[in-house]
């Protein structure tokens, strides 16, 4: 035996279980002949299934799968043995009024099958899915706001083109109107880290209308609104 071999740890069942618990991994096995599914304690807790069940099958587990995901998971489960290589499927399970996301992973094509039993893991991926949904919501909101800004910029360009006598006048007027929008945005959405009270509605309206009141010495626009804060 080499010195390297003497330093290798002896992996016992208790060590493996400690590692899986630390990683949040739940274990399962499936008898391809009887359809019986065996799970460890973590898997029972993840699925919200009673440990008193005499026999666990897909049909028993399917009662907890979200109705919108059930047929997709059922089809994937039926096709598991025909899949080549590793597979992974994410789906939702219902825990009372709460929704939990589970990722089931294993090897298809009867890879590493032993005594007609296939093996795999369950992972709780709820936090990852919630983060993905939050990112999608944020991306959708940002897309909506960008489209609004482009619509405003397009409208300002058209309005300015009608009133400007020369292209130089148009460039100057359009720039001042866009800068006014930027200043208004700063009023209601302060720069990160700056704690500023909400702006007054009158100030906001005055900033937005200032570019339309800069021709000549005569005041063209007067703002009179109730004293009201806007955020």
Image (cartoon, rainbow, N blue to C red):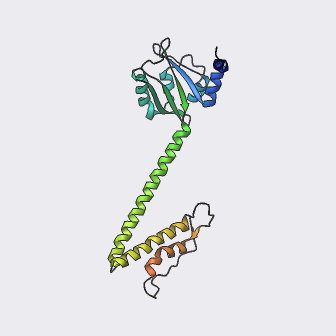
Q: Quadrant of residue 26?
A: top right
Name the spot of residue 15 as percent of width and height, x first: 65, 22
* Vertical arrangement, residue 218 with respect to residue 210, above or below: below
Q: Nearer the viewer, residue 61 or 85?
A: 85
At 38% from the left edge and 70% from the top edge, which residue is drawn?
Answer: 156
Q: Confirm whether residue 157 shows in the render.
A: yes
Q: Quadrant of residue 165?
A: bottom left
At 54% from the left edge and 22% from the top edge, which residue is drawn?
Answer: 28
* Vertical arrangement, residue 198 with respect to residue 119, above or below: below
The extreme front residue here reads: 2
Name the spot of residue 142 as percent of width and height, x first: 46, 55
Name the spot of residue 111 as percent of width and height, x first: 45, 18
At 56% from the left edge and 28% from the top edge, which residue is drawn?
Answer: 47
The extreme bottom residue here reads: 217
Q: Confirm whether residue 99 shows in the render.
A: no
Image quarter (top left, top right, bottom left or bottom right) of the N terminus: top right
Name the spot of residue 166 as percent of width and height, x first: 33, 79
């Amino acid at each position: 035996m080499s010195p390297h071999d003497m330093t290798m740890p002896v992996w016992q069942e208790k060590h493996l279980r400690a590692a899986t618990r630390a990683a949040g991994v739940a274990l399962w096995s499936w008898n391809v002949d009887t359809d019986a599914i065996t799970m460890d304690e973590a898997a029972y807790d993840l699925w919200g299934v009673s440990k008193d069940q005499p026999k666990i099958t897909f049909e028993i587990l399917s009662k907890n799968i979200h109705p919108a995901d059930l047929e997709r998971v059922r089809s994937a489960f039926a096709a598991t043995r025909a899949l080549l290589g590793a597979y992974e499927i994410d789906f939702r399970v219902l825990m009372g009024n709460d929704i939990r996301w589970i990722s089931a992973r294993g090897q298809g094509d009867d890879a590493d099958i032993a005594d007609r039993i296939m093996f795999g893991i369950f992972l709780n991926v709820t936090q990852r899915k919630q983060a993905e949904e939050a990112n999608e919501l944020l991306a959708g909101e940002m897309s909506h706001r960008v489209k609004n800004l482009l619509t405003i910029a397009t409208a300002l360009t058209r309005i300015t083109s009608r009133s400007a006598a020369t292209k130089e006048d148009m460039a100057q007027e359009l720039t001042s109107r866009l800068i006014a929008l930027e200043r208004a945005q700063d009023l209601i959405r302060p720069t990160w880290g700056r704690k500023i009270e909400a702006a007054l509605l009158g100030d906001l309206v005055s900033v937005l209308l200032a570019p339309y009141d800069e021709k000549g010495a005569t005041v063209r626009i007067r703002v009179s609104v109730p004293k009201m804060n806007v955020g």
